[in-house]
Amino acid sequence: MTWIPLFFVVLVTAATVIIGIVATKKSKSASDFFVAGRTVGVLMNASAISGEYLSAASFMGIAGLVMKNGYDALWYPVGYAAGYLFLLLFIAGPLRRFGAYTIPDFAQGRFDSPEFRRIAVSFVLFIGFFYTMPQMKGAGVTMSSILGWPYWVVILIVGTVITFNVAIGGMKGITVVQAFQYWAKVFAISVPLFVVMSVTGGYNSQLEQAAESPTGTPRLAFHAEVKVKGKEAAPNNILSFSSLEPVTISFPEGADIAKVGPARKPEPGETAIKPTELLEVIDGDAKPAASMHMPAGSVIRVNPVTVMKNGAPIFKDMRHVRTSAKIEFATATKVLLHSAYGVQNETGQGPITPNAPSNKAWLNPFGPFTSKWGFPLLTTYSLIIALVCGTAGLPHILVRFYTNPDGRSAKRTTLWVMVMLGSFYVFTPMWGAIGRFAMPLLYANNATDSAVVKLPTLLADKTLGAVLSGITSAGAFAAFMSTFSGLLVSMSGAFAHDIYGKIMRPESTSAQRLKAFKIAAVGVGVISMGLGLLVESFDIAMMVGWAFAIGAASYFPLLLLGAWWKGLTKTGAAAGMLLGGLCSLAAIVGHMLLDKKILTLDLPPLVRALMEQPAIWGVPLSLATMWIVSKATSSTVPNDIDIKMLRLHAPEELGFSKDYIES
Amino acid sequence: MSEEANVAGALTPQARAELVQRLMKRQAGLSLRVAAVFVVLLIGIPLFNLYAPEKAATSEFGFTFAWLFLGVVFFPITWLLSAFFVTRSDALEAEIARSEREHLSTAKSAEGAKS
């Protein structure tokens, strides 16, 4: 029944393209292309902002992260929605009154500096591309999971469709398209959920189930078939087993195992645990070793081992500390997980789900996600800072505020955006909570990201299941399309409006700029597809977190201090933006390389925690640099700074506002 | 350019700087008050979870307290905060516009009297 989900995806895509084309007929001038003529109503604009903002990360990623990590992942929807409050309090009103199209316009207008425009443009592109990657992955995961198409085929097809749509329609077209997509997404995340809950039980009953047995972990069915990924998908090529009981595994197709080690990270002084202790060969002639080939037909048992130190077992909470195996696979294959007692045995319960945290760790704060490096509070705060400050730093979000007629409606729009986003986000963790108990196989498959599209298939009525899965797939696809379109518009706009129109050819006509916009859209689309192909193995929501971290350390300080501190100079702002943004970027790229094992460095866990979540030092670093350098260069504060400040802060009635770009 | 903008251009640098200071102080005052509530929440929730884990784990309608608060209740709280801000901010800006117009016109007539 794969045609049913495909039908819904094609339907939402067709609706998008058609609405885009119809709206485009009304879109004529350059101003329409860049900021939709600034005449969009509050509710329409709020729907469009929400539609653009709710990305594949929001639609699929949060459910996946909540399923995988539990409580800690709740900070994602909260941070995504709450970031708007900061935007509303400090940035939305002043920026709209200042009357610039884009952040580069703001940068140039505030500091009278064309050079600064270049730096700001490069950050639009930087953050834009970073944010594009997870969107691409979201589209790839949805389509390949419902249709079985290869990931790269999906990326090329959807990338082309959307690039085409943006190149013909610009901003005006997508305002309507995105408003439509918001409502499509709210429908897709909520309605199928209620049907699924009628089978699995409600949100609270899932959590109650977790609270009732703290040490429990969801179990798979007997002989569960697990699809493991290969080394190219690292760190998603693992099976990490529970230390509570053994599991029997058979390898019908054989397997190449890259590494066998204990699941629990050994501490100094502990006796090293050998692969021969963890793996016991039941059938076949495999030789357990750190890396090994498992011939087809092999059967092994994974045994928990007591951790020893100086010849004696370690105790914690009055029990022996035990660990089981973590197996990293070199190539993709299929394995079967049986019970604790052997291939044929079906007494008791099915095998404990590998890769799933215990109920207690999942349900309560400071679980595996934030405790990974041993600094749960620090990691939590860093994540919060990245999400809250980063919202203001997303280039495709801010540009939308200029489509409001004045600062007052900009504020109203933000309020409505918060209501719309909250009404959407409250549903996303529900999918994760239900997925934990209803479909634990997703843990073993390292595929929690697909919970939203997979869960409806649990329904006994297969046709209804396929229809609902089609609806969620279409929602995920709409999420991907709208965010990707928004990013394409901002990035192509940056090329056409800032690089071409302001830097390369200031004398160009608006027809030439339109042409530049279209060419840039195609170029940016192609690069984005290329990047999308590289990130198949990363968590969607985590990649988005990184884009936020970079935005939080570069744009947010620029906007906050630029709007509220007269003393900010262009040198100070540029230095802070570059230092904060580039250091955060370096930390994140370093973390990615270490995680992928491309780079091997033995860094202390505190450093790894700060690299994975850099906002907690990146944002203060950027703010402090801006302050210090501005103080040192205070003679370069523009002479007319008071007039600029009046434009930013005087209510419109006083008449100090003026469009930076006269159209 | 509107007539009022010309008025601003005609302000002495001194008067303009004072006007900017007054405006920013009033606008920032409101924003900072609302932000303070929000920041206390954001800093407080992890601390509460860390130092009162039993309270965070108490069961409310099947949810843990911590989950119910962050996963459900938090969203309406942000709506209330932003609705409060938008209403107050509109009132504040109307009031600023009224009082500053008065200020500007008295300054202008005073200057007119001088010359």
Image (tube, coloured by chain):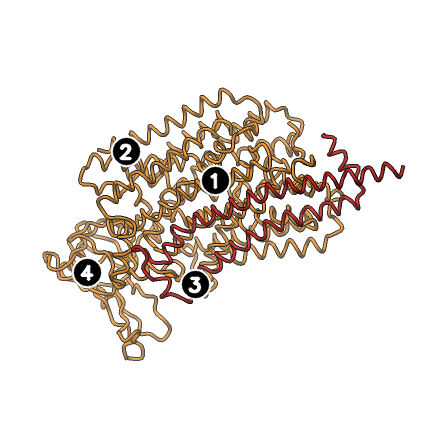
Instruction: Please determine whether, in this image, residue A166 is positioned above or below residue B84.
Output: above
| Chain B, chosen colour in render | red
The kind of secondary structure element at disc 1 is helix
- Disc 2: which residue: A5
For badge 1, the amino acid type reads: Val
Q: In x, y percent, where is residue A76? A: 42, 50
- Disc 4: which residue: A247
For badge 3, the amino acid type reads: Phe
Is disc 3 on the same chain as disc 1? Answer: no
User: What numbered label is drawn on residue A417?
Assistant: 1
The kind of secondary structure element at disc 2 is helix
Q: In x, y percent, where is residue A125? A: 53, 40
Of all residues shown, which one is farthest toward the top? A25
Say few, some or many: other residues with alpha carbon within 10 Å of mark 2 (under 14 / 14 to 19 / 20 or more): many
Q: Is residue A561 left or right of residue A68?
A: right
Q: Quadrant of the C terminus of chain B?
A: top right
Instruction: Report the mark closest to the observer, 4 or 1.
Output: 1
User: What numbered label is drawn on residue B48?
Assistant: 3
Chain containing mark 4: A
Say few, some or many: other residues with alpha carbon within 10 Å of mark 4 (under 14 / 14 to 19 / 20 or more): many
Instruction: Tell me how far mark 1 sits from mark 2, CA to CA.
Output: 29 Å
User: Which quadrant would residue A462 be assigned to in this image?
Assistant: top left
Q: Are marks 1 and 3 in contact (CB under 8 Å)?
A: no
| Chain A, chosen colour in render | orange
Is disc 3 on the same chain as disc 4? Answer: no
Is disc 2 on the same chain as disc 1? Answer: yes
* Residue shown at the point (28%, 33%) measured from the top left: A5
Q: In x, y percent, where is residue A187? A: 35, 36
Instruction: Tell me how far mark 4 sits from mark 3, CA to CA.
Output: 38 Å
Of all residues shown, which one is farthest toward the right? B115
First in sequence: mark 2 or mark 4?
2
Q: Quadrant of the N terminus of chain B?
A: top right
